[in-house]
């Protein structure tokens, strides 16, 4: 990002609770940016189910172009029962935008601090702090042939060397800024693609002598996430395994509604979004937890705009709000979305 | 099984702790069979790493033939670091035997009773009791093409209609003997094979009006296994998802060393085995938990030989042994394999 240039932010509010939490995220962004601290312009576009309703397609051309011309993208959540029978579902738009913007690296932090331990459904009491680096634009999500006939169907899990290499470097570079450990998760005792990953990652690992490296089968990893999650630092894995393990990891925090994620390519805008879905069951009630969206805003400020200072203001304000027990029902609180959002904003303003 | 015919049991002790727990399982089988209660003959054959060492192949022809001619197969555990670089690894033998015997249905019970709740790594306190029905001889484990080149690699997830149908009937029939609920786990928002499964399973579900039926995406299921495992009854899923979810499910019990499993076809012998691996780290120490193997024996007696009476004697004896705190270290006890095994045998004998 060039200094002093107005940041261009594409905003995709999406479906069900999406617009509710996006509004919260944008209010916090405004609060933290006040008095010229951060100059930005938002560009709202329809995406997902909302875009199907408006334009007949979950990812309209105009939405994609706005994203391509932006510095960063904020996405809330898409999909829901309303479009389950649509010829092209909201999720298809998600896969398309990932591919079109080449967002090959999905970064998902999983943390359980001692303060948050009480919300965790697991008994483990050691602090947990790891990141999943999930390959996002290849593998069985995009491999061809993909066929469904009357008598059989098939999908193809496919990876090129370059696809494995680029995500591997991201994982190792991330480990260098953390606890210097990478675990490759695969199924190398069965899959050809996993053996392929193991060879390439093993070779690249030698270029990072300051990072220790090990491997785990995906079935074993799904156990360790429950029994010893404190032992992970960076988990590197392919698209489908990453989908499963990152949701499992989110669950062990017990606070799904508070976790952001980032999807990035080699260049171009990165996309920031909560890891949870559009929660049709609580939409319109005003009780959705805004924290995942607010943290997505913080992640964007730190990563795309190099404003760790503002990101820290936001996360400090979130922590203070939680410590005051101002929380939505998912964390056992009685506050609504607006109250939590306002408390975060108050905390930001008071700290100045 | 014909009445009064001597039961023919193939015994594959395998590697590392395999022979230790198999010995325990066979001692309990002998104890429960005493005084003409059950007539059987065991046929021990090398399999896995042991077979690589002896015969250069993890599944020698002789071993396969013995299995084919038996009424049931007991397998302990195979594999380990010793054979990691072998041209054909022990695991390849496992895949081969599944395919050769057409063991397309892998049945894995997951239960947490109130007595065992203390061993569980999750906080959930409701009793958990579900079964995973995993397709075992198709999908990405066996699909072709499967290729690894210098620049790319690929695997194929492939299912035929018949493969999906036969496992679906097994799941629904199992639900009829349980709490009458089946959950299909898939990734139908992305995969063609999952959409294919959903169509076929949805149709078959209509033939079982006494069974309620729902579906879950695999990522969501990996969360629910932690947050609300009490809500599952029968989980039906394809091979790879079943691999991951069944290990995750085992982990939430906190007592991996006590869980048996069964793999069966439409006819021919079924295979019974612990769900855990060969545990090289504790091999030779005499402290492996024998319960998973002993329960595999009980599962065999109940299912292949229709001897629920003997199976119940065994499980009662196991429960009594645990309630006396005679347990191996994995359950926090101080007993060794022999002591636990002997306590189970004593309990069987005393109850007569
Ligand atoms: C909605 C779905 C296609 C998507 C995925 O599987 O990637 C979601 O689960 C996610 O993890 O972002
Ligand atoms: C050893 C391996 C090939 C096997 C599998 O993935 O099926 C194992 O994990 C299992 O679940 O029995």
Image: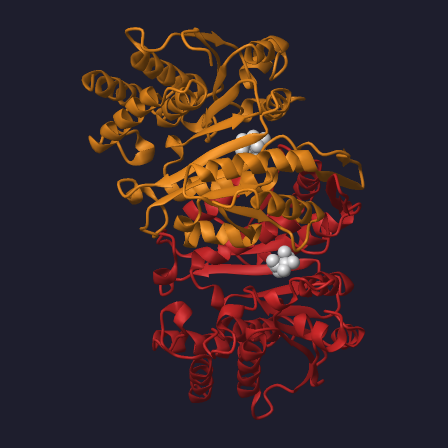
Chain colours: A red, B orange
Image quadrant, ligand 1: bottom right
Residue at 53% in and 81% down: A24
A117 left or right, relative to A74: left
The answer to which image quadrant residue A93 occupies is: bottom right
- The percent position of residue A171, horizontal first and vertical second, equals 62, 53
Between A41 and A88, which is closer to the camera in this rendering? A88
Between A327 and A281, which is closer to the camera in this rendering? A281
Between A334 and B40, which is closer to the camera in this rendering? B40
- Residue at the extreme bottom: A35
A59 left or right, relative to B69: right
Compared to residue A36, the image places residue B70 above or below, namely above
- The percent position of residue B10, horizontal first and vertical second, equals 49, 12
Between B336 and B325, which is closer to the camera in this rendering? B325
The answer to which image quadrant residue B7 occupies is: top left
Residue at 36% in and 46% down: B121
Q: How many labels does the image show?
A: 0
A31 left or right, relative to A226: right
- The percent position of residue B318, horizontal first and vertical second, equals 28, 27
Q: Name the image quarter holding the N terminus of chain A.
A: bottom right
B113 left or right, relative to A221: left
Instruction: Tell me, yes or no, if residue B48 can be seen here.
Output: yes
Instruction: Tell me, yes or no, if residue A179 can be seen here.
Output: no
Compared to residue B263, the image places residue A23 above or below, namely below
Residue at 70% in and 75% down: A53
- The percent position of residue B138, horizontal first and vertical second, equals 66, 33
């Amino acid at each position: 990002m060039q200094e002093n240039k107005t940041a261009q932010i594409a905003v995709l509010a999406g479906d069900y609770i999406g617009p509710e939490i996006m509004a919260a995220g944008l209010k916090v962004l405004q609060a933290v940016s006040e008095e010229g601290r951060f100059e930005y312009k938002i560009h709202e576009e329809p995406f997902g189910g909302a875009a199907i309703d408006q334009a007949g397609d979950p990812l309209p051309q105009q939405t994609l172009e706005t994203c391509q011309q932006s510095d960063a993208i904020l996405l809330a959540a898409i999909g829901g029962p309303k479009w389950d029978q649509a010829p092209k579902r909201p999720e298809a738009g998600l896969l398309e935008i990932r591919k079109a913007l080449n967002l090959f690296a999905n970064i998902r932090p999983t943390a359980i601090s001692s303060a948050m331990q009480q919300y965790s459904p697991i008994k483990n009491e050691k602090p947990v702090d790891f990141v999943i680096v999930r390959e996002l634009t290849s593998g069985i999500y995009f491999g061809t042939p993909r066929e469904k006939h009357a008598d059989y169907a098939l999908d193809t899990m496919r990876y090129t060397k370059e696809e494995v290499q680029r995500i591997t470097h991201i994982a190792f570079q991330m480990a260098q800024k953390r606890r210097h450990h990478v675990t490759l998760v695969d199924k190398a005792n069965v899959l050809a693609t996993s053996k392929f990953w193991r060879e390439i990652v093993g070779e690249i690992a030698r270029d990072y002598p300051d990072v220790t490296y090990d491997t785990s089968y995906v079935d074993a990893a799904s156990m360790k996430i429950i029994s010893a999650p404190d032992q992970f630092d960076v988990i590197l894995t392919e698209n489908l395994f990453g989908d499963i393990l990152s949701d499992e990891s989110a669950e062990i925090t017990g606070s799904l509604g508070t976790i952001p994620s980032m999807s990035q390519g080699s260049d171009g805008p990165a996309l920031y979004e909560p890891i949870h879905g559009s929660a049709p069951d609580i939409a319109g009630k005003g009780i959705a937890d805004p924290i995942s969206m607010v943290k997505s805003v913080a992640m964007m400020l730190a990563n795309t705009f190099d404003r760790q200072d503002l990101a820290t203001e936001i996360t400090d304000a979130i922590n203070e709000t939680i410590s005051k027990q101002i929380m939505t029902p998912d964390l056992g609180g009685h506050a609504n979305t607006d109250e939590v959002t306002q408390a975060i904003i108050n905390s930001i303003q008071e700290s100045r």
